[in-house]
Each structure stands twice: as structure tokens, then as C-alpha cells.
Image (spheres, grey):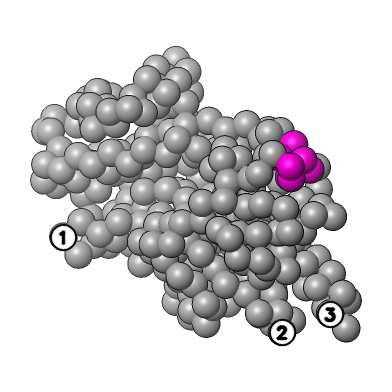
């Protein structure tokens, strides 16, 4: 069978299938696995340009995170952020947040280490059968945002088409700002409320644990929507907004904007995944809260359901 997408949902799904003995191929349209657990290197240093961190309260996912910690892949980061508003800022407590010294993408790469993942190979069509790009397969798991899955589906696949149509997504721009030096007070991360540009700012040097003078700002959906065609043009206003927020006297020496057209699900499906009688499965954090944990669990649950169905049919 074929799994489309090598984000954390896709590799979790494929991992369950492989462990059950089901032949599987993971096809990823990008150059590397990771999906929205994205990291990019600047002068050899990884910076998270997708998800800002992960949290864990599901016992099974907590066990996965503890395994990553034992392997040195994640570290406890913080349970306290700042919250900015019209009346200034204050500290707010929340769940324990985990960060990855080598970037969150390294966690997906670890899960995919022994999986048959093919990158730079997009899927272009899924027809009844199911048939993927003209090739018959036992089933297909679409582990990508619904709006990216929709163009692949033949309209005759009514259940899957209806399921992806129920998803709604909001955009964001992640902007990496590297400064000549650290000129801000320690804050780890900050939620920014009622701001025309900013939604979240993270101290990537603190997150990574190397104290590099790097911040990553995530914009509001409304601001991002106005800059999706030319995301680079958003760099100067985002930089100025961050400098104004933190009172930074000097400009950034590097500004890089990453566009996420489908950054966060705002409406999705019922349960933790979709699997219909036509052999089409859907997984991702649209089936739950917009969290890394939700995407992992969705892929894991879909993989188990597919394995059970395929092994029952096969024998």
C-alpha cells in the first residue's frame, strides 16, 4: 500500500504497517521528510521553521517522547511563556514543552529511519480501486492537509472527498530573525494577543540550548493571508513588529520567511482518522487538536486500522 506524506502522521502510519508485516511505500513530495515539523539550517545551525515545540499527555506518545529523550533527541524546554496584551505582559504557565536540539524534523527522520520513504516523488492522482498514479494498490493513506489531498482524489471517491472537504485550515508565516547579539531579556517564548502581525515569538537560541541570537516569529492568519503570494515581502514588517515588541535597538542581520498556507487546522473530522470502504485513509492533526501529538496518534491509529483490514482480507 501507499502512504502519501512523510510528516509525523505519515511515518507513524507507515511504522505500524511495517511492524504488522504489510508492504508499504511512503511517497513525499518534498526534498526531506518532516512535513510541518520543519527545520532549516542557517550557517550549519538548525532552526525550527514549522511547529514551535511539542507537548505530550497521551501515555503512548509520552512513551515515544521519553524514548527520544533517552536518545538525546529532545530536551525539556519550558512550561512558562510570556503573554503580551494591551496591558503589557505577564508569565503564563502551561504544559511541559519539549524542544529538539537538532530541530524537530530530526524526530520525524528518526521515526522514518527504517521505513521505505521516497522523497521528491509527489502523488498526482488517486482513483477508485484504489489506483495511485495508474498503479493499483491495496489501500492508500493520505497523511497531508485536506486541501492538498483534495486535488488528488477522483470525485468518484465520494467518502474521502467529503471528508477532506470538511477540513478548514489557516495560514501562517514563520520568520527567522538572526541578530548580531542577544539584546533581549530571557523569555523563552511569548504568545502575542490582539496584535496585527504577531501571534507567537520563540527564542530559538533558548529553545535549541545554544543561546544563539535567533528568534522565530509566527504571524497571525490574517497577516499571513495577505502575503501568501509574496511571503518575502512580509520580512520587514515582521522584523519591525518583533523589534517593537521586545525593544530591540539593532536590526536583524538575517531575515528568512517560510510560508505555511496550511499551518493549522481549524475544523476537521470525527475520531482520530478516516478510513472508508473504498480503501482511502486520511490522517493528521485535523483529526483532533492542532498538536504534534494529535498528528502522531492519528497516523498510528490509521496504520493499525489499515493493518488489521489488510491482514484480515489477505488471510
Q: Determine the residue positioned at 69% across, 75% down.
A: 17
Give the residue number, with chain letter if any, for mark 1.
Answer: 43
Q: Report crowding for label 3: few under 14, some 14 to 19, many 20 or more residues within 10 A (C-alpha).
A: few
Quarter of the rendering occupied by the N terminus: bottom right
Q: Determine the residue positioned at 27% across, 28% down.
A: 230
Name the residue at the front extreme: 134
Circle 1/circle 3 CB separation < 8 Å: no
Circle 2/circle 3 CB separation < 8 Å: no
Q: Is residue 41 above or below residue 24?
A: above
Q: In the visual, does 172 lie left or right of 312?
A: left
Determine whether the residue tagged by mark 2 lies in a helix, strand or loop.
loop
Check if residue 1 falls in the magenta segment. Answer: no
Please tell me whether mark 1 or mark 3 is closer to you in this view.
Answer: 3
Indicate the position of residue 241 as horizontal and vertical percent values.
28, 24
Indicate the position of residue 5 as horizontal and vertical percent values.
53, 58
Determine whether the residue tagged by mark 3 lies in a helix, strand or loop.
helix
Q: Is residue 7 above or below residue 70?
A: above
> Magenta span covers which residues?
156-163
Rounded to the nearest whole Å, what is the CA distance between mark 2 and mark 1? 41 Å
Give the residue number, with chain letter if any, for mark 3.
Answer: 314
Rounded to the nearest whole Å, what is the CA distance between mark 2 and mark 3? 12 Å
Majority secondary structure in the magenta region? helix
Give the residue number, with chain letter if any, for mark 2.
Answer: 21
Q: Report crowding for label 2: few under 14, some 14 to 19, many 20 or more residues within 10 A (C-alpha).
A: few
- The quarter holding residue 47 reads bottom left
Check if residue 162 falls in the magenta segment. Answer: yes
Determine whether the residue tagged by mark 1 lies in a helix, strand or loop.
loop
Q: Report crowding for label 1: few under 14, some 14 to 19, many 20 or more residues within 10 A (C-alpha).
A: few
Q: In the visual, does 177 lie left or right of 157?
A: left
- The quarter holding residue 42 reads bottom left
Amino acid at each position: 500500500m501507499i502512504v502519501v506524506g512523510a510528516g509525523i502522521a505519515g511515518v507513524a502510519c507507515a511504522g505500524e504497517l511495517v511492524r504488522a508485516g504489510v508492504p508499504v511505500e511512503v511517497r513525499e513530495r518534498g526534498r526531506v521528510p518532516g512535513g510541518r515539523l520543519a527545520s532549516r539550517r542557517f550557517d550549519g545551525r538548525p532552526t525550527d521553521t514549522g511547529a514551535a515545540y511539542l507537548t505530550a499527555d497521551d501515555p503512548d506518545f509520552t512513551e515515544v517522547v521519553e524514548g527520544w529523550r533517552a536518545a538525546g533527541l529532545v530536551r525539556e524546554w519550558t512550561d512558562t511563556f510570556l503573554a503580551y496584551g494591551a496591558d503589557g505582559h505577564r508569565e503564563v504557565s502551561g504544559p511541559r514543552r519539549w524542544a529538539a536540539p537538532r530541530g524537530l524534523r530530526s524526530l520525524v527522520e528518526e521515526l522514518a529511519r527504517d521505513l521505505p520513504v521516497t522523497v521528491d516523488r509527489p502523488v498526482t492522482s488517486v482513483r477508485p480501486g484504489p489506483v495511485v498514479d495508474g498503479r493499483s494498490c491495496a489501500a492508500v493513506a493520505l497523511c497531508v492537509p485536506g486541501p492538498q489531498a483534495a486535488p488528488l482524489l477522483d470525485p468518484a471517491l465520494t467518502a474521502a472527498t467529503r471528508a477532506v472537504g470538511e477540513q478548514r485550515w489557516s495560514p501562517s508565516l514563520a520568520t527567522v530573525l538572526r541578530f548580531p547579539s542577544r539584546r533581549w531579556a530571557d523569555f523563552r517564548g511569548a504568545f502575542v494577543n490582539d496584535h496585527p502581525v504577531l501571534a507567537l515569538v520563540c527564542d530559538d537560541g533558548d529553545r535549541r540550548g545554544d543561546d544563539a541570537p535567533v528568534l522565530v516569529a509566527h504571524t497571525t492568519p490574517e497577516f499571513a493571508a495577505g502575503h501568501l503570494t509574496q511571503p518575502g515581502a512580509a520580512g520587514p514588517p515582521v522584523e519591525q513588529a518583533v523589534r517593537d515588541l521586545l525593544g530591540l535597538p539593532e536590526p536583524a542581520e538575517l531575515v528568512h520567511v517560510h510560508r505555511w498556507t496550511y499551518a493549522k487546522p481549524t475544523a476537521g473530522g470525527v475520531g482520530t482518522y478516516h478510513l472508508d470502504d473504498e480503501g482511502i485513509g486520511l490522517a493528521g492533526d485535523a483529526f483532533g487538536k492542532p498538536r504534534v501529538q494529535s498528528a502522531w496518534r492519528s497516523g498510528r491509529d490509521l496504520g493499525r486500522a489499515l493493518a488489521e483490514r489488510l491482514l484480515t482480507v489477505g488471510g
